Image (cartoon, rainbow, N blue to C red):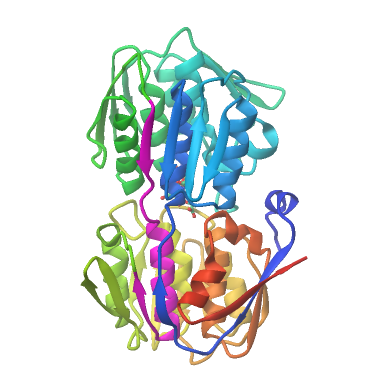
Amino acid sequence: MHKCVQDLEVFDLKSMRIWGGRPLDGTVNIQGSKNAALPIMAAAVLHKGMTVLHHCPKIADVLFMEKILIQLGAKVCWKGSSLYLDCSSLENTNIPDQYARKMRCSIILLGALLGRFGKGAIAPPGGCVIGKRPVDLHISMLEALGTRIEEKQGLLEAHTAGLQGGMVSFEKQSVGATEHAMIAAVLAQGVTCLKNCAKEPEIVWLAKFLNGMGASVTGAGTEEIQIRGVSVLKDSEFEIPPDRIVAGTYLCAAAITRGKICLENPPVLELSAFLGIYGKMGGQYDMVGGKLIADASGANGAVGLVETEVYPGFSTDLQSPVMAVLSLARGKSHIRENIFEDRFRVAEDLVRMGAHIRINGRDAYIDGTQKLQGRRVNAQELRGGAALILAGLAAEGETCVENFSLVERGYEQIQEDIRSMGGKASIEEG
Ligand code: EPZ
C-alpha cells in the first residue's frame, strides 16, 4: 500500500474506528476554513505588527504554518479559537525545511518574505500525494515581479532589489499561485495586474483580509485582479469563514447514511455546484434562519457524469467524499477528475469495503452496490481519508481508518462532529 511517507514521519500513527449502519441525525457547527486560513497566515508576515484571526481552525496544517512563523521569529498564541500573530520581530527569512516539505502552501510565504525583506528561501514544498503539484507558476510569477530565484543545495533561494508591480498572466488557473501573487504584490512598487486568476472563495477572503490590513486589492473572485502597492500596513483582526469543504463532507456523511443533519453556519453560497450533485442524488435541503437543514433520506440516486472543475465548478476536494456516497447509489455514476492527475487513490480501499469502482486515468466508473463492509483501511491523503470515514459510517460493522493524522490536516474535530451528528466514532493512538 503506497503511503505518503513524508506525512507519516511527522504524525504519530493514529486511527479512527467507526461503527456504521445508522442514519446520521444531529446538528453540527462548521469549523474555520483551512484553505482560507493558511494563505491569510502567510500574508500576516507582510506586516510588522499584530494580526488576529478569529474562528481559526486548530488543524495540523494550521499548526504547521504556526510553527513556521515561530521559526521565522513571530510570536504566536491562541485564545480559544482566536490566533494572535505578532510579526513585529520577524527576522529569519529561511523557511524551515521540516515543515515546508510537509505542507504545499508554505511556498506562498516566499512572496510575503520578499515583499517585506527582499529575500527568502524555502525547500521545494510537499503536500498530499494527489499529483505532481509543480510550482512553476509561482516561480514565473515572482520572476515577473522582479525576483531572482536560484536552486542551491536543494533550497529555492529568492532575492529582489524590491518587488516591482507588473503584469502576470497565468498559463492555467491556480489557487495557490493567485494567492501568492496577491501577497507578493501588496508591498511591491506600483500596480500589479493578474490575469487568468483562480476564482475560489478563498481568493476573495484573502483579498478581504489584505484590504483590512491596508492593502489595495480589487477584482478578487474574477479572472483579473489588480493590486496597487502600498508601503504601510496596519494591525488587523479577521474572522475566518466556515470551511466549504468540511460542510460538503458532512452533507456527504448525511447522504451516505441517508440521514438528516443541520449545519449551523454553512457557507451555502460557496457550495452551489456540490449542492446540485447532492440534489441529483435525491438529497433535499432548506435554509432556515441561516441554518441548512438537510434531509438525505432519499439520497440514493446515481448521478451520471460529474466532473471536477475550477470554481465555481464542482470542487476537486469533494470528489473523494462524493465517490464514497456514489458507491452506495442505485445505478452507475462516472467521475472525471480534471484538476489533479492522481486523486483516485481512495478507490482501492473503497473497493476493499465492497464498492464496485473501476479507474481509467482521470475517469472513475462507479457501479453502486447495496452494502459496504467495515474493514481496516488506510488514509493516503486528506480528502481520501475523510471519504473512508464516510464509508465507515454507512458500512456494516466496524471500520478502522489508519493514518488518521492525515485527516487531522483539514478536519479540526471530526470525531466530535460525527458524534454531534449522531454517528459513532473513536480515535485510537498508535
Ligand atoms: C489549493 O491547492 C488547495 N489547497 C487544494 O486543497 C485544492 O485542491 C486546490 O487548490 C484546487 O482547488 C490550499 O488552498 C491550501 P492549484 P493548490 O495550484 O493551490 C497545477 C485540500 O484538500 N499547478 O490550484 O496547490 C496543479 O498541479 C487541498 O484542502 C501547476 O501546474 O492548487 C494542479 O493540477 C488539496 N503549476 C492545478 O494547477 C503550479 O505552479 C491546480 O492546482 C501550481 C499548480
Q: Is residue 181 visible?
A: yes
Name the residue furthest top.
161
Q: Position of residue 261 (x, y in %)?
A: 37, 78
- The image quadrant that residue 330 belongs to is bottom left
Residue at the spot 34% in from the left edge and 55% down from the top edge? 309
Q: Residue furthest right?
A: 430
Relative to residue 316, is residue 255 depicted above or below? below
Viewer-nearest residue: 221 or 22: 22
Position in image of residue 333 (x %, y %): 39, 77
Position above or below: 67 against 260: above
Q: Nearer the viewer, residue 315 or 368?
A: 315
Q: Residue at x 43, y 37 (%)?
A: 52
Of residues 248 and 375, the one nearer the viewer is 248
- Left or right: 38 with respect to 236? right
Which quadrant would the N terminus be assigned to in this image? bottom right
Q: Is residue 160 magenta?
A: no
Q: Is residue 173 visible?
A: no
Q: Position of residue 174 (x, y in %)?
A: 40, 41
For residue 257: magenta?
Answer: yes
Q: Position of residue 85 (x, y in %)?
A: 50, 33
Q: Residue furthest front?
A: 79
The image quadrant of residue 270 is bottom left
Tell me which residue sits at (42%, 58%) in the image.
316
Q: What residue is rendered at 28% in x and 54% in y?
A: 312
**In the picture, which quadrant includes the C terminus?**
bottom right
- 93 left or right, relative to 253: right
Quadrant of the rendered structure where residue 220 is?
Answer: top left
Give the magenta-colored segment's residue range: 235-263
* Tally of marks: 0
